[in-house]
Amino acid sequence: MLNAQGLHARPADMVARLARRYRSQIEIVKGNERVDAKSVLGLLTLGAYQGIQLTLYAQGDDAEEALDALVDLFERELLEQEKRAAEEE
Amino acid sequence: MKVLRGIAASPGVAVGEVMVLASEGYRIPRRLAPRAAAENELARLAHAVDAAAQEMIAHRDAVTRELGKQYGAIFSAHELMLRDPQLHAEVERLVREKRYTAEYAVSRTLRRYAKVLQSMEGSLAERTNDIYDIEKSLLRHLLGRNREDVANLTQPVIVLSTNLTPSETAGLHRELVRGFATELGGMGGHTSIVAEALEIPAVVGVGRFLAQVSGGEKIIIDGHEGLVILRPDRETLARYEDEAERRRQHAVQLRPFWNEPAVTADGVRIRVCANIEFPEEVKACRVRGADGVGLYRTEFLYLASSTEPTEEDQFQAYRRVAEAMHGAPVIIRTLDLGADKIPSAHAAEEKNPFLGMRSIRLSLRHPEMFCVQLRAILRASAYGDIRMMFPLVCKLEEWREARRMVSHVIEELEAGQIPCNRQIPIGMMVETPSAVVMLDRFCDEVDFISIGTNDLIQYTLAVDRSNSDVADLYHPADPAVLRLLNMTVQAAQRRNTPVSVCGQIAGPHYLMLLLGLGLREVSVAPSAIPEMKRVCSSLSLDACQTAARAALEMDDARQIETFLKDELTRLAPQLAPNAP
């Protein structure tokens, strides 16, 4: 989890929206908590903060693409977004 | 079951079903649906979700056009949440397994999420507003034209809300709102006063708790202890129902005093009058044998709407009260509010509102507004025994200026041949140390005085009662306050100026003290009148005087309080708080 604010408001939306693009069932696991990656409420209440280890599981015919896209989102996009937001201030 | 602690705003106990009042008050009509109806409930839900989603998309597009993508995104986020698979799974489970109605299942689930988010750190708490919005939206679509709101209640409920303004409180239907509780609010606020006037048990300042309740649940409001009990277990429920029964019995015990005048054990007549806010309360006063209206708080005419009340509005209200009291005196207090509550006053924010532009100062600073009120009071004086009283008079100049304005208005009315009582008795409230200290001079000019104990205590001890940090320094039995009360009564008696108390009377022990200091008239909430009479009948003035004299010798507030309570128990054990 690289984003400083953890899985907060807009990032959570972005994750859910992306996950929904895929047909596979996708889950995010933190410790022994498990949520549906397509559920905003689930993501918000997961309480994921910076530095925490998250594991992604996907099952279905587009599982690989889904995982690739999500990992990409976490690593690049969310960090970019934060940088941009900081510059705007 | 969960017990929450707030501030006891209005006494009484209420047990009932929750109605959560949002800004559009929706009441969830039923918690459970018949077993076979699950599919139907889910179909209704699906329909409502679609309708709500459509609405959100329409909002998003409109807002994006007006304000840009960033703002429109808020509605996209709402729509995303609305379609959340976990949310739907949970709601469906509740409908199928627990037979909840779609409304109750939606509310219950969303509030559970809201509660979790609220307890998390950072900006997540703001997302709870989104959740409430979605709840509102879904409920609106589910309930459609059948939505019930506070104005259309058909079943008794307990109203829960973030906050209730005095006028919203006043608008609560007495028969059907058994009690209420709010997240915000403090002691002695106008909302509490209204609740007490309407005799609706209430607890305020509970803090955030609405996320933990859903419409239709069982709840207990304990307006004596300031408790809100969610989903009470059987034992607690039984205990409260017993308690309610005990209080009903107590009320029955007080019944004989309703029609009796208040007389002490040694035969001295005490006048017990009523504090009211609305003409509708007069009935409660008369039924309890009030000797008059000792304080008609006119603020509520100003608080009830966003524009100032016209002369006609005020005149009608004052006249109604005068006539309904059938010749018993009615003391009307002129506007006792701060500038922040008066639209035309264009008030800047005050650092110390209690020491600021309020009450008689405000009236004198806005003579056009003041004259409107004076005219209304004077016109009404032709219809009953109306008397006028000015709040927060600190200086002789203020009194004199106000008095001059009254003369001016009388002349105006007489020139217009409008009937009024030229000899209308005019008095003042004694609420500040300066008034007490100058009382001998005031008594030369006023027709009567009334001690506002609440404010007198605050201004004397320099304590803001609503500030929880210092609230425990506020003491009605503080020795300084006792000396000022004593000075006031002595000065008034020396000049034959009628004196009464119209602040809060902290209990039977305090009434004993007041009687002992020489007071023969008090004004209290109508619901408290029978108890006051009962206390009087149980005490002799001799004993009260002895107690008061002893209290005046002490210099510690807590010591005085304990002493007074012990004395009361000794003199009249049947009056002690835990007496059967």
Image (cartoon, coloured by chain):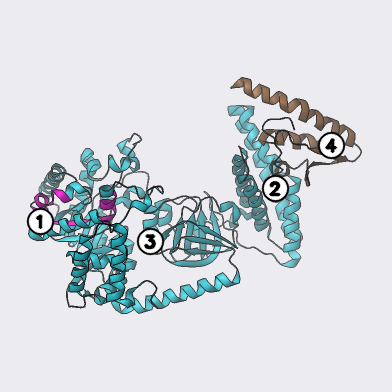
Q: Amino acid at mark 3?
A: Glu
Q: Residue at x 65, y 58 (%)?
A: B104
**Residue B500 appears in view:** yes
Q: Residue at x 35, y 79 (%)?
A: B253
Q: Which residue is mark 3?
A: B196
What span is colored magenta in the figure?
B436-458
Mark 2 crowd level (few <14, some 14–19, many ≥20, 10 Å Cα) = many
Q: Mark 1 to mark 2: distance in Å?
A: 68 Å
Q: Which residue is mark 2?
A: B49
User: Viewed as shown, does residue B436 lie left or right of B561?
Assistant: left
Please determine if labels 3 and 4 lie on a single subunit: no
The quarter of the picture where the N terminus of chain B appears is bottom right
The secondary element bearing badge 2 is classed as helix
The quarter of the picture where the C terminus of chain B appears is bottom left
Mark 1 crowd level (few <14, some 14–19, many ≥20, 10 Å Cα) = few
Point out the frontmost of discs 3 and 4. 3
Quadrant position of residue A14: top right
Q: Are marks 1 and 2 in contact (CB under 8 Å)?
A: no
Chain coloured cyan in the rendered structure: B
Please determine if labels 3 and 2 lie on a single subunit: yes
Mark 3 crowd level (few <14, some 14–19, many ≥20, 10 Å Cα) = many
Q: Mark 4 belongs to which subunit?
A: A
Mark identifier at residue A22: 4
Q: Residue at x 29, y 66 (%)?
A: B563
Q: Mark 2 belongs to which subunit?
A: B
